[in-house]
Amino acid sequence: MKLINITSASKIDTLIISVSPVSIGGKEERSQIKKTNKLLYRFPWEDLMFLFHYNPLAIGHSFNIFDIRANANNVGGYLYLDRFKLQKDLARRTTKTPDPCIPHEAQLLYLDKIVAYCRSKSIRLIFINTPMYHAERFYNMDNFYKVIEDKYNDVTFWDYGNYVLPDSCYGDVGHLNYIGAKKFSAMLQEKVRNKYNQ
């Protein structure tokens, strides 16, 4: 829905979207499909029924009229992450097995819809795997790459999952904080300018 709003308001020719073990879901991220979503009232009926299958109660709670009005468009975009919990996250993960990186079918459904929409509008789509702290220690990267290769091999994929940044740049294992985001964004902006001469 957000992509449709953006493309109808202005002409874009390229969309860069984060696709990583964190964004397409694994053990911890899979639980997010069960959380309420304040934008469900905008979803097509068949999508609501698909999600209802996984958590009927969450769908019902999502239609709270007060929450909808207060937070209707407060989703997506850049989050200024003022967090420095890498060491705490590392300690927490020492006893856990790596995330299998098997995406939830609902995550893939919406990724498929983004791909189809971009194709229909002739928008160049680029998936980007953003930096994570030693992703191979915490995620089954073979499974992640297999999903990209099997389902999205015709989509440009920029892999920065192993892009090295100082520990101070990570909010936790799977996310950059604002310091890391600024450094990574500057590097990425330079790459895009050089590649597309813009």
Image: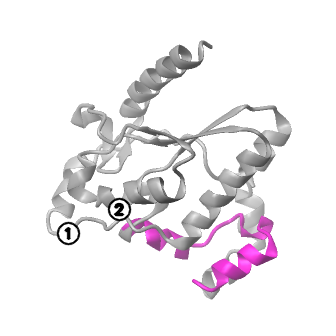
Quarter of image, res 121: top right
User: Could you say which quadrant of the image residue 167 lies in?
Assistant: top left
Residue at screen point 20% across, 62% down: 93
- Which quadrant does the N terminus fall into? bottom right
Indicate the position of residue 75 as horizontal and vertical percent values.
Answer: 64, 52
- At label 2, the amino acid type is Asn
Q: Nearer the viewer, residue 124 or 183?
A: 124
| Residue 96: numbered disc | 1
Res 58 label: none
The residue located at (72%, 31%) in the rendering is 13
Q: How is the image coloured?
A: one colour
Q: Is residue 185 above or below residue 47?
A: above
- Is the residue 143 above or below the residue 173 in the image? below
Q: Nearer the viewer, mark 2 or mark 1?
A: 2
The circle drawn on residue 143 is: 2
Residue found 27% across the figure and 50% down from its top? 135
Pointer 2 or 1: first along the chain: 1
Q: Which residues are magenta?
A: 28-54
Q: Residue at x 34, y 42 (%)?
A: 161
Other residues around mark 1 within 10 Å, as few (<14) / some (14–19) / many (≥20): few
Up-down relation of residue 147 to residue 51 (above or below): above
Coordinates of residue 172 in the picture (x, y in percent): 31, 49
Is residue 168 within the magenta segment? Answer: no
